Image (cartoon, helix red, strand yellow):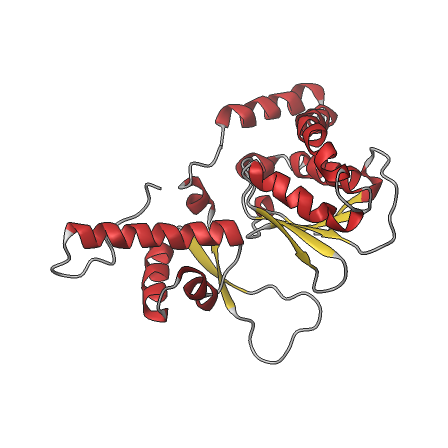
Amino acid sequence: MKYVRDATRAPGDEPGVQEAHARTRERVARSILENGPSTAAALGERLGLTPAAVRRHLDTLLGDGVIEAREERVYGHRGRGRPAKVFVLTPAGRDAFEQAYDDLAVGALRFLAETGGEHLVAEFARRRIADLEERYRPIIESVPPEQRAAALADALSADGYAASAQASPVTGEQLCQHHCPVAHVAEQFPQLCEAETEAFARLLDTHVQRIATIAHGEGVCTTHIPRGGVVPATGTTENAERIS
């Protein structure tokens, strides 16, 4: 990462100390990238840092525009008290990890939409995800249904999406992707997200709901996989749903 600076340098800090601070800040930022929105306490426990050290590095990252603070999103019943503060990467922070953002791709898709219509962008998105779906299908079908969300998360992680599957606070499971290689493009062309969600529904052979995306400003792409009620996939959008 190229964003780190010497804001935490104290008078008398040696170059080696400065480099150590920079490496720790990168560890903090990468932990947020790989695990999604994180509290200061969670970061400290995850990285073995003291509360003071975590706060110092978070303050630097906030000042650099690499991360931002938000109230923790709570699903279902919210208890008393204010929600915890969590830290998420900003678009600039994601760029620092050499995220694949291609101006040429945006321009090409815009040209396609203007000259041929939005339906061609949607068709492009479906064809783009077809290779991923073809590669993942044998992996998903080789495990029992109750393990398929985890298998999909592992496959996505191998492709750089930093994904995980976990129990949903409501019912079922949540598939979380903490990194999106095309987030900047998907900001302007949500068809990319929609095609991906459709593919997940077909791979898991059930109705799924996309409840958050990095492209829409969330800290993580989250897909809800309801428990039970399997709906055979048809190759259309009827099994995939976006909740705004």
In the depicted structure, whether residue 9 falls above or below residue 101: below
Q: Residue at x 76, y 58 (%)?
A: 172
In the depicted structure, whether residue 117 falls above or below residue 69: above
Name, please, the residue furthest toward the top: 115
Q: Residue at x 54, y 36 (%)?
A: 181
How far across and down, in percent of the image, does residue 43 sit? 44, 62
Horizontal placement of 206 versus 17: left or right? right
Quadrant housing residue 108 = top right
Horizontal placement of 17 versus 76: left or right? left
Picture quarter with the N terminus: top left
How far across and down, in percent of the image, does residue 196 sit? 69, 37
Q: Residue at x 48, y 49 (%)?
A: 33
Horizontal placement of 193 versus 237: left or right? left
Horizontal placement of 166 versus 240: left or right? left
Name, please, the residue furthest toward the left: 12
Name, please, the residue furthest toward the bottom: 80
Tell me if I can see residue 9 in this picture: yes
Front-most of 226 and 65? 226
Tell me if I can see residue 65 in this picture: no
Front-most of 171 and 143? 143
How far across and down, in percent of the image, does residue 37 sit? 52, 58
How far across and down, in percent of the image, does residue 224 sit? 72, 53
Tally of numbered discs: 0
Q: Residue at x 20, y 57 (%)?
A: 9
